[in-house]
Image: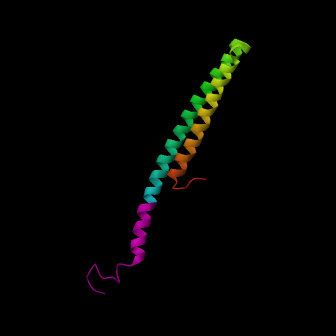
Amino acid sequence: MSDNPFNKSENTDSNVQSTATGATGAAKTATSMLGNTAGGLANTAGGTVGAATRGLGETLNSATGQAAKPVGDGVANIGAGVEGAGKQTAEGVKRAGEWKGAP
């Protein structure tokens, strides 16, 4: 073999693929960590806001009885919707971080 670093026999496709795989693997690891962290935070925030809002609606129902039941139910339903949206967002962020497509 020659001392020429550009000699095709020395620069095989497997070397190029190995470098690309290493870079891709590092990127996947980094985005997975970020995705899992962001997804966990979104899940926590959605769960906290949702539970608090749902609890507020239930408290309104308990405190006011039938008079404000539609309002209390509406507030509780908003809380459940926020919680569900937070979970879906968190799952999407986690899947993106793992380089997975939509389910």
Q: Which residue appears at 44% of the width and 61% of the height?
A: 24
With respect to residue 6, does 73 lie above or below?
A: above
Colour pattern of the rendering: rainbow
Which of the 4 image quarters holds residue 55?
top right
Q: Which residue appears at 71% of the width and 13% of the height?
A: 67
With respect to residue 100, does 37 lie above or below?
A: above
Spot the residue most to the bottom: 1
Q: Position of residue 69 (x, y in %)?
A: 70, 18
Looking at the rendered structure, the number of numbered marks drawn on it comes to 0
Question: Magenta segment, which residues?
Answer: 1-24
Most foreground residue, 39 or 26: 39
Most foreground residue, 27 or 52: 52
Q: Position of residue 103 (x, y in %)?
A: 61, 53
Q: Which residue appears at 47% of the width and 55% of the height?
A: 29
Q: Is residue 7 magenta?
A: yes
Q: Which residue appears at 51% of the width and 56% of the height?
A: 99
